[in-house]
Structures are given as structure tokens and as C-alpha cells.
Amino acid sequence: MGKQYKMIKRLVDRITRSDAPLNNFFTYYGYKVYQYSGQKDYTSVTVRDADDKETLADFSFDFLTFDLVLEGYADDGVRMALVEAFADIYSPITVTDYLLDDRIKEINKVLDLPEEEYKDGWFDELRDKLAYLQSLPIHRVTRGSLTHA
């Protein structure tokens, strides 16, 4: 697991501690972290690069229901690091991933087109990508239920 992903796991631990402020801004391993909440049982977090140009992760967590909502992330490794970090602390969690849902819908739209209009093998690549996306953990996730490729 890369340094960036290990940093995410440590960050989740920091923002979920009971003594963490409700609304907070801090720099963590060169990333800007914006943590917002109007109540102690919920937090919304945005992690951006040092220049504030790119978002590494955008998510929220409900501490009462253990619902993790992923609104955006830089790549699937960041996504998995977030899911694993929360599942390790609050197992089992429920994951809602709007970005993943959108990616799956877009691929399904393309796969609905007539296959003969495209180059050989292109649909197979899309089908493989769709299978991979559908294999990512969603819904109920428990500690230790995630595997690494």
C-alpha cells in the first residue's frame, strides 16, 4: 500500500477521535483537510492537495448509523483506503458511493450501443472494467472482508 493510502488511514483515525473539533481545518502530510459538522455524530471531510487545486477525497460519515458516503476520490486506491479505514474502526459500515454509481451507469450506457459500431475488443475492455467496478465493496462492509489484488 502506497504512502498516500497509509496517510488516509491515519487521517481517518485522527478525524474520528472523540476529541476532534466539529469544524476544523488543518494540514496533514501536505494535504489540506477541511472537516465540517454541525453535530458531534456526523462529519463531512474534504482532502485537497497543498495548492487547493485537486481533491484527493470528499466524504462524510455518520457515527450513529456507521454510514460512509463517498462523494469523490482521486482513484480507486483512495476509495479502498477510505473504506478499509472506516471498516477497521466501525465495522460493519454501510458505503454509499455516488461516483462509483455514475461510472457504472456511464459504462452501461455505452454497452447498450450496437457492438458492431466499435473496434474489436473495445466492448470486452468495457465489460472487464464494469466487472471490476461492480466488484468494489459497497453496501455493508466488515473489518477484514476486503482483499487486495
Image: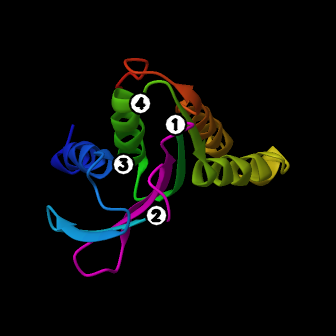
Q: Secondary structure at mark 3?
A: helix
The residue indicated by pointer 3 is: 78
Give the mark, 3 or 1, whose residue is nearer the N terminus: 1
120 is higher (above) or lower (below) than 22: above
Q: Nearer the viewer, residue 111 or 143?
A: 143
Give the mark, 2 or 4, whose residue is nearer the N terminus: 2
The residue indicated by pointer 2 is: 37
Give the mark, 2 or 3, whose residue is nearer the N terminus: 2
Q: Secondary structure at mark 1?
A: loop
Of circles 2 and 1, which is in front?
A: 2
Q: CA distance from mark 2 to mark 3?
A: 22 Å
Query: Callout 2, which amino acid?
Result: Ser
Residue 44 belongs to magenta span: yes
Crowd band around label 4 with a 10 angstrom C-alpha radius: few (<14), some (14–19), many (20+): some
The residue indicated by pointer 4 is: 90
Tell me which residue sits at (69%, 49%) in the image.
107
102 is higher (above) or lower (below) than 32: above
Query: Callout 4, which amino acid?
Result: Tyr
Horizontal arrangement in the rendering, residue 126 relative to residue 24 (left or right) = right
Query: Callout 1, which amino acid?
Result: Phe
Q: Quadrant of residue 32?
A: bottom left
Where is residue 49? Give x, y as percent. 27, 71
Of circles 2 and 3, which is in front?
A: 2
- Quadrant, the N terminus: top left
Crowd band around label 1 with a 10 angstrom C-alpha radius: few (<14), some (14–19), many (20+): some
